Amino acid sequence: MTEPLLEARDLVKRYGSVEALRGASFTVHPGEVVALIGDNGAGKSTLVKCLSGVEQPDSGQILVDGTPVSLDSPSAARGHGIETAYQDLAVAPDLDPAANLFLGREIRRSGVLGKLGMLDKAKMRAEATEQFAKFGVALPDLSVPIGALSGGQRQSVAVARSVAWASRLVFLDEPTAALGVVQRERVLDVVRRVRDNGMAVVLISHNMPEVLSVADRVEVLRLGSRVARFNASEAKLEDLVGAMTGALSQEDAS
């Protein structure tokens, strides 16, 4: 297998007397979907925060392409092509999908108008249309506020926004939470398209059937440590549940 794109080795993170990560490790390779699973309190959110630059571990190593790096801010992670789409969506409901795609990265018009803060809405809409088509995000009308779209469509826009700015890896935190079956499948199709375009995806999810349907590999956290790894094509639902609950505790289970 190729060298890991992103790797965590023995990360420790404490919040006062609480040890959220207890020597946690994690690996993702280029062009694969890795599911990160674990029960509540397993350390998933803390690990993702450390790997996306939101938090810094107290000890341990983070490596990109085999080289130790310091991800001391989200900007530092973005510098390595890493983006994150959080569960709360963080979309602006009153803005249209194109404006949401470019939120915080708006394109200004050239010349004096740009210096006065005028946005190039036509260019943003054209580029947004291209991005949405690339990842199979089907939207009925790009001119309507995103708040008027379905939950699945809003989540697809949030995923596409992260993917549009990521060049190598995107973390997706519970991207299908609170969605119906049809909407969930649309979002998972976007995830597959992202992988097929050569980008790595880390999927954080509590939905085990969903994990097995879309992931290439599964890594399991329990009590702040990685306790098992599986090839998704060979894993069974009871294997994942057993690793999460402690009935199965076997590093490198695959």
Image (cartoon, helix red, strand yellow):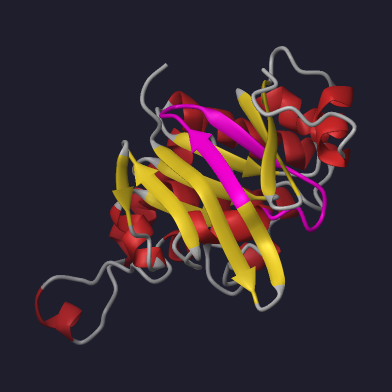
In the rendered structure, which segment of residues is drawn in magenta? 23-43
Closest to the observer: 38 or 8? 8
Q: Quadrant of residue 33?
A: top right
Residue 41 falls in image quadrant:
bottom right
- Which residue does the image show at 58% across and 64% down from the upper left? 13
Query: Image height check: is 13 above or below 212?
Result: below
Where residue 46 appears, x then y in whole percent? 62, 60
From the viewer's perspective, tell me whether residue 233 is left or right of residue 105. Answer: right
Say which of 212 and 66 sits in front: 66
Q: Residue at x 34, y 65 (%)?
A: 75
Residue 90 lies in magenta, yes or no?
no
- Whether residue 166 appears in this view of the structure is no
Which residue lies at the image location 53% right of the left edge and 71% below the top edge? 95
Of the pair 43 and 136, the residue shown nearer to us:
43
Seen from this angle, which residue lies furthest bottom? 116
Relative horizontal placement of residue 10, taking residue 42 as reference (left or right): left
Say which quadrant the C terminus sits in: top right
Could you tell me how many numbered marks the image carries?
0
From the top left corner, tell me how far across and down residue 159 is, in percent.
55, 49
Q: Residue at x 60, y 23 (%)?
A: 216
Q: Quadrant of residue 118?
A: bottom left
Taking 151 as reference, is 210 above or below it?
A: above
Task: Tell me if residue 80 can be seen.
Answer: yes
In front: 62, or 156?
Answer: 62
Q: Residue 170: x percent and y percent? A: 48, 46
Looking at the image, is 95 positioned above or below residue 238? below
Q: Quadrant of the N terminus?
A: top left
Residue at the far left in the pictured view: 111
Question: Could you tell whether 251 is left or right of 60 in the image?
Answer: right
Q: Residue lying at the far top in this picture: please name it.
A: 234
